Amino acid sequence: MSLNLQEKNGCRLKMSQIEAFCTVIQTGSISEAARLCHITQPAVSMQVRDLEQYCQQRLLKRSNKGVTPTPAGLVVYEYCRKIMHLRQDLHLELKKFKQTP
């Protein structure tokens, strides 16, 4: 399932970016997020970079100790969590249609 929203700047918001970003915030580590998402570390970095480009904001502070969200990153994280919860709710609602004869 791919959710794409076109913006004026030509960037797209994708669920893969949202999932990767949330996992990075939750773990505090791009490499750990990559492990949990079953993708490479460069792929996670690219997803985060693309999300930052979409938002036109730096979302993470990177250091040798890991990553932490910027103030803008915290706001984006909360919205990303809501989007993921809404997607989960949608899937649960749609399952009800499959269960009815």
Image (spheres, rainbow, N blue to C red):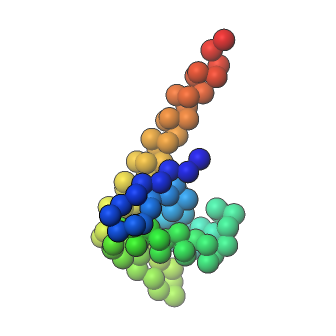
Instruction: Spot the residue most to the bottom.
Output: 64
Left or right, residue 35 beside residue 81: right
Q: Is residue 13 left or right of residue 40?
A: left
Residue 7: where, in percent of width, then height? 36, 61
Q: Can residue 66 be seen in this view?
A: yes
Depicted 37 relative to depicted 67: above or below: above
Residue 61: x and y, percent? 40, 80
**Residue 49 on image: x %, y %:** 47, 75
Location of residue 28 in the rendering, given as x and y in whole percent from the top left corner: 51, 71
Which image quarter is the C terminus in?
top right
Q: Residue at x 37, y 55 (%)?
A: 78
Residue at x 64%, y 62% (from the top left corner)? 37
Res 22 visible: no
Hey, which residue is sitting farthest top in the picture?
101
Relative to 21, residue 40 above or below = below
Residue drawn at (44%, 59%) of the image:
13
Figure label count: 0
Q: Residue 86 falls in which quadrant of the image?
A: top left
Left or right position of 14 against 74 = right
Picture quadrant of residue 45: bottom right
Left or right: where does residue 57 sit relative to residue 50? left
Q: Which residue is drawn at 54% across and 74% down?
A: 46
